[in-house]
Image (cartoon, coloured by chain):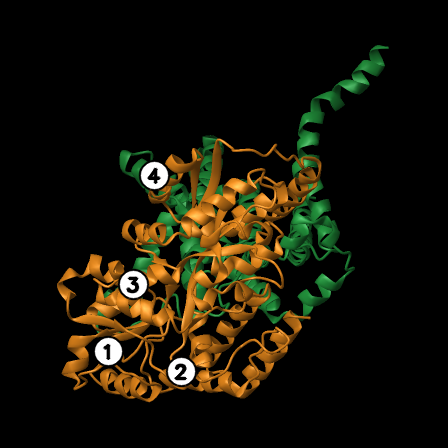
Chain colours: A orange, B green
Amino acid sequence: MRKLVTMAATVALLAGLAACGNSSEPSGTPASLKVWVMGDDGKNFTNLTADFTKETGIKVEVDAIPWANVNEKLTTAVASGQGPDVMQIGLSLLSTFQASGALLDLSPSLGAHPNLKGDNFLDAVAPGKLNPQGKVLSVPWISDTRVLFYRKDLLSEAGFAQPPKTWTELHAYATKLASRGKDKYGYYIPQWDAPLPIQFTWQAGGDVVDKSGKVTLDTPEFRKAVDFYTSFYRQKLVPTAADFDQAQGFISGAAPMLISGPYLAKTIKDQAPELNGKWAVTTLPADKSGTALFAGSNMGVWHKTGNAEAAVKLLDYLSKPATQLKWYQINNELPTVKSALSDPALAADPNVQVYVKQLQDAKLLPVVPAWDKISSKMLDSLNNMVLKGADQTSTLTQLNADVASLQK
Amino acid sequence: MRNRAAGVTPYVFVSPAFVCLLAFGILPIVVAAIVSLTNLDVSGLGDWGKVEFVGLDNYRDLMRDPAFWESLRNTALFVVMGVPVIIGVSLAVAIALNQSQSLFFRALRAFYFLPAVTAIVAIALIWGYLYNTQFGLLNYLLETVGLPRVSWLTEPTVAKFSVALVAIWRATGLNIIILLAAQQDIPKEYYEASAIDGAGKWRQVFSITIPLLRFAIFFVTVTTLIGWMQFFDEPYVLTQGGPSGATTSISLYIYQQGFRFNEFGFASAASLILFVIIFAVTALQVRARRNADE
């Protein structure tokens, strides 16, 4: 407790200090830019920007921040006023970063940088969808989405030559596959995965943001998504253990179908090379649509940077199709720039072709500050229904009340 | 003149400790109390203008949040489960370990202390594997003797006990050492005298060792109780408070509100309530002990 109070107080005190130390450095060509990238390793990013340094003489100092520490790092930086020049922003944290006021509005300087033009990027991350009205607080960097992973061998043993294309097929396949015996399931639902029920809502033809920009789950489409979600539990087609390991479950065949991101493909390739050719990915099974989550990261500029001009230059460099492709080659993360995505360099890997196709029908989660709390309430409600047997109607009524009160 | 110097000297000596207490003990609590009356969040950190005084709104919202009450209930359950078990086990093991100074017993001492010096992340990893429903060792053992699997960390009720077990296992080591050290302070003469009077081993334990360990037991009780009211590490690393809040302690709740949702005002309000509870419980204990001594 003492520790928590101290932490809270430190944040508050630092914030007070920050008010005194508002220094701005003189502009001009700076010797170096400080960049925060998310992840465990900054080496690849340093390699990526070697050419940028050669061209412009601007050095790039990379700080790698583990994903788990990003929020803490941000609050400390905001409270102290001491941040980097450029930072990577995971889309799930975009609204927090925007609300913190830590991002510089880039719209005045975009004109001089053709690579940053809004329509260069995928439609899912068009500037209007990422930013509050009239501002550009960050630009797209890498993209990520969700696809259906399936075991070709197990599906064909069950008599399915093709992966499921619709909700009905997904459910029918799962039922058949779950009947293989004890500890065999048809499908897998990660209980921590907030985007999954939202994807189902989109696929049912709905949205979770209403016309006024507020999040609402009080729609027939969301209820349909919940029905679909809970049906897998009702018919015991999915494991109920929260610690079910999706990679192990997929490799062992216990869960022969699941929806996940490209990172799972890497895990499977590394851990089970013997499965090569026995599994594949495909675009998400559709109801009215097969819309998937658009995940990934943006790049933004720290609001108190003294190097705004150089920072935007770096963003421009990062948005060049060639840079985006090079990043895919060295770090396996997909471009957000349309022309890079259609490059033949990405055509070699059939999985990547599926990701690229799915990215054309992918959507952002709501970019609102209350989203984190809403999505965690939503997961609690769903888990209460499927694990503790809570009544669906009353749970959803309570959830809708909570969602409304979180956005007062 | 001399008198005045003598009057100042003690204050000079206590002042460093006092300043530290003020800066790292009292001041943060005061700051948290003030913050708890505001709507401070991440946007307020960057721009003080956005911070508003909201009176007791945070406390009212807290009282209305079922998750807060669940975390309080969980914490109470953890305290009721954990504290007596830890004190009982530590005391028993400490007395048993004190029966001999042989190499084997000294090795055992190190064995019991090991969990206390092992990194919590390593502990979480190993216990996570032991508890895993699919391929955990515990379920493997259950299945080999024909028993059904148990969802150690994923069934809401079972998870509370699993998490508490790890915490008990981890916390006994340090308490054993404290009680062991206190036993070595008990004069040998008492045991010799009682042996002459014909007291057996058990009689000695109950009539000499335990009564003379009174202060050590009190100390262990107070620290363990405070530790368990702030229960955090084990649920944080093992279950992140799940499944659906079943292992969320009050400290973990505060952490989630403050450092995951960045609701600093709200989290400060919760932490202040926890502070008041701990303060009250500890004051009660000190009072009870004073009465017992008189």
Q: Amino acid at mark 3?
A: Leu
Please name the residue that numbered disc 1 is placed on.
Answer: A184
Foreground disc of the pair 4, 1: 1
Between A172 and B199, the residue placed more toward the observer is A172
| Mark-to-mark CA distance, 1 and 3 | 20 Å
Between B204 and A160, the residue placed more toward the observer is A160
Q: Amino acid at mark 4?
A: Ala
> Callout 4 environment at 10 Å: few (<14), some (14 to 19), or many (20+)?
few
Have a look at marks 4 and 3 and say if they share a chain.
no
Have a look at marks 4 and 1 and say if they share a chain.
no
Q: Quadrant of residue A152?
A: bottom left
* Local SS, label 4: helix
Mark before the other along the chain sequence, 2 or 1: 1
Q: Is residue A148 above or below residue B18?
A: below
Q: Is residue A194 above or below residue B219?
A: below
| Mark-to-mark CA distance, 4 and 3 | 42 Å
Residue extending farthest right: B1
The label number, if any, that marks residue B110 in the structure image: 4
Residue B139 visible:
no
Have a look at marks 2 and 1 and say if they share a chain.
yes
Q: Mark 3 falls within which chain?
A: A
Between B119 and A300, the residue placed more toward the observer is A300
